[in-house]
Image (cartoon, grey):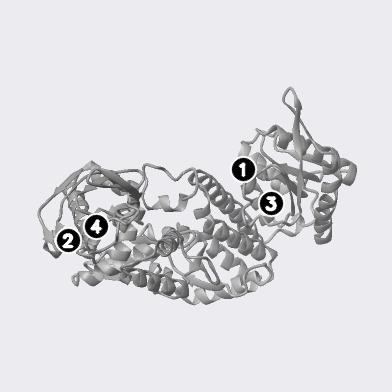
């Protein structure tokens, strides 16, 4: 868009300039690429004085609109003696104010168009930064601020999908007529941590939407409420998503988990809360605690930045980095919510009341706990991998635990006839074996697994089998589940972090079976934090021609010790 201005007179002379500006794809993030090949020459504004090029700068655009680039030709801008820089005097500042106002007006002119929506999609981070730091700045006519004009264009993530604040408030006002606890003109927010999976699950089935906010979004909404007295903000905690009703059984469930989880490696300061929620919510959810100290520092920094008119570039860079970060996980403040309405929890309580020492209680509590850990890691996975792992794991967990608890309840509720005790009814006998978990599409992985299958029989006198070696009249998932249940322990190749491999490792460890993890030394994928380094061995692989691969000769000797250790763990339990 073009700007021509010759209207005003100040002590330095008539304001006179011509500008041709455009909105590019790069915004404030260009600051992170200074000194690299990504530092594009197309970013920034070219400054001319009376047709003579002076410099290119990214400082002339307002902080909230650093995505605006182009050319400005001034008639009377003051220059340095070298004529390679402009003097940042009152005239320079006046020009900046005029340009900022015209940019703001242009954005307002685009209201309701696809162009504005594209600008917001590309430069949401820049706009959020501007609203957080200089949202109260009056750059529009009629004394309207950036916050007044831009807040309605910024989309927010809610439990009912992405929406804009005006639409959100309409939804809340409509819900307030149908739900007693929903208050009119109230913006409900819940802090989004490193993962928001647990909060999302809890909030998604509410009668009204809840906004999932990062720190910068919290400040913007807080400023909006302060400047609009007709609205209020409620910051929700996980407890707000549960019913207030407490039953006697809740205390029993809490005691049950405290007893069983004392035998499982978990954070010492882990808190347990039993709440009543809908049956479809998982049996247990891990909710991260907010870091109030970091939050306070964050907001103080923003307030200091918004009051500093001569903000230095290195400070702006630090602020931008801070805006890009989410709250750090506070390991000293984590809560496990147990859903007393979940069917698995109800079955668990029945077994506990009959026999508090039953070994299936530890299996179930441990499996539910690891399910909660996996759920909390949801946000660190790609959408596709998260969907595969979460859905498959929850389905498997529900099936395994339901069968386990059903067997225990049958033993408790049904008395066996005396003649059935010690009967000669045939039972299935399975030879012990080691289950190999791996991808079937990687030649280097298959070469390493072949070495495992050659090593195990010589070392332990039993076979090492993959899912493809043991074919039954079952579906593939059922075949894998059966082999996991019947095997002695597992060996898993975690090269590439294959989602199904990770799922099967979780199933094995859930049943208390150790897993030797092997990995190609050339694999650059980051190992998930909950995999750990126990029973972990690497190998080197290379192609020897015609699609055939080999692994280094040291690998069988190295992995031998880990296989013996895993076998020893199982033998000790037996």
Q: Looking at the rendering, which quadrant does residue 186 occupy?
A: bottom left
Q: Secondary structure at mark 2?
A: loop
Instruction: Tell me residue 268's x, y (percent).
Output: 62, 74
- The mark lying in front, picked from 3 and 2, is 2
Q: Which residue extends farthest front? A: 81
Give the alpha-carbon distance from disc 1 to disc 2, as whole Å.
67 Å
Identify the element where label 1 is drawn: loop
Residue 521 screen position, x and y as percent: 72, 44
Sequence-wise first label, 3 or 4: 4
Secondary structure under the numbered disc 4 in the rendered image: helix
| Residue tagged 3 | 508
Separation of disc 3 and disc 2 at Cα? 78 Å
Q: Which residue is mark 4?
A: 96
Q: Is residue 156 visible?
A: no
Q: In the rendered view, does 23 fall on the left or right side of 112?
A: right
- Locate residue 158, reporting x and y percent: 34, 57
Quadrant of the snapshot with the N terminus:
top left
* Residue linked to disc 2: 12
Quarter where residue 253 is shown: bottom right
Residue plotted at (53% across, 77% down): 251
Number of other residues with Cα within 10 Å of mark 1, as a class: few under 14, some 14 to 19, many 20 or more: few
- Above or below residue 431? Residue 104 is below
| Disc ID at residue 498 | 1
* 262 sits left or right of 386 in the view: right
Gap between marks 3 and 4, in whole Å?
64 Å
Residue drawn at 41 percent across, 63 percent down: 319
Q: Mark 3 or 4, which is nearer the eye? A: 4
């Amino acid at each position: 868009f073009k700007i021509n201005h010759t209207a005003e007179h100040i002590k330095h002379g008539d304001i006179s300039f011509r500008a041709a500006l455009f909105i590019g794809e790069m915004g404030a993030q260009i600051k992170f690429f200074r000194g690299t090949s990504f530092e594009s020459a197309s970013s920034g504004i070219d400054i001319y004085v009376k047709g003579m090029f002076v410099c290119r700068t990214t400082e002339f655009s307002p902080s909230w609109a650093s995505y605006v680039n182009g050319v400005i030709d001034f008639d009377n801008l003051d220059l340095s003696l070298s004529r390679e820089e402009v003097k940042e005097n009152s005239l320079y500042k006046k020009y900046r104010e005029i340009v900022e106002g015209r940019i703001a007006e242009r954005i307002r002119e685009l209201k309701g168009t696809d162009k504005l929506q594209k600008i917001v999609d590309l430069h949401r981070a820049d706009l959020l930064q501007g609203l957080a730091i200089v949202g109260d700045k009056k750059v529009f006519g009629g004394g309207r601020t950036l916050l007044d004009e831009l807040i309605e264009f910024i989309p927010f993530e809610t439990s009912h999908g992405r929406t804009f604040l005006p639409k959100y408030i309409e939804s809340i006002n409509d819900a307030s007529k149908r739900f007693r606890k929903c208050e009119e003109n109230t913006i409900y927010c819940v802090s989004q941590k490193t993962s928001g999976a647990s909060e999302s699950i809890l909030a998604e089935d509410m009668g009204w939407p809840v906004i999932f906010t990062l720190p910068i979004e919290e400040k913007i909404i807080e400023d909006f409420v302060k400047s609009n007295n007709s609205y209020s903000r409620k910051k929700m905690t996980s407890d707000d998503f549960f019913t207030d009703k407490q039953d006697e059984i809740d205390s029993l469930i809490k005691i049950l988990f405290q007893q069983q989880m004392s035998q499982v490696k978990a954070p010492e300061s882990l808190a347990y809360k039993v709440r009543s929620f809908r049956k479809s919510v998982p049996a247990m959810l891990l909710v991260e605690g907010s870091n109030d100290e970091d939050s306070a520092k964050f907001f103080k920094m923003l307030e200091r930045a918004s009051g500093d008119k001569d903000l230095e570039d290195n400070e702006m860079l630090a602020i931008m980095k801070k805006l890009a970060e989410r709250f750090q996980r506070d390991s000293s403040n984590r809560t496990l919510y147990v859903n007393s309405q979940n069917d698995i929890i109800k079955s668990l309580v029945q077994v506990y009341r009959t026999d508090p020492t039953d070994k299936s209680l530890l299996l179930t509590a441990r499996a539910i706990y690891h399910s909660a850990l996996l759920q909390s890691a949801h946000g660190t996975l790609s959408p596709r991998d998260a969907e595969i792992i979460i859905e498959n794991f929850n389905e498997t967990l529900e099936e395994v635990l339901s069968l386990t608890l059903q067997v225990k309840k049958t033993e408790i509720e049904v008395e066996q006839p005396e003649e059935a005790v010690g009967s000669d009814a045939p039972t299935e006998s399975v030879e012990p074996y080691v289950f190999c978990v791996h991808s079937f599409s990687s030649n280097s992985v298959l070469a390493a697994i072949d070495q495992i299958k050659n090593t195990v029989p010589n070392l332990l006198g039993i076979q090492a089998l993959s899912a493809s070696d043991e074919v039954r009249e079952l579906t593939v998932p059922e075949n894998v589940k059966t082999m996991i249940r019947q095997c002695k322990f597992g060996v898993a190749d975690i090269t590439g972090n294959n989602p199904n491999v990770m799922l099967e490792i979780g199933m094995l460890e859930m049943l208390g079976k150790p897993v030797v993890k092997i990995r190609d030394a050339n694999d650059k994928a980051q190992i998930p934090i909950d995999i750990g380094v126990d029973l972990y061995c690497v190998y080197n692989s290379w192609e020897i021609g015609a699609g055939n691969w080999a692994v280094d000769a040291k690998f069988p000797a190295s992995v031998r010790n880990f296989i013996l250790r895993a076998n020893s763990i199982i033998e000790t339990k037996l």
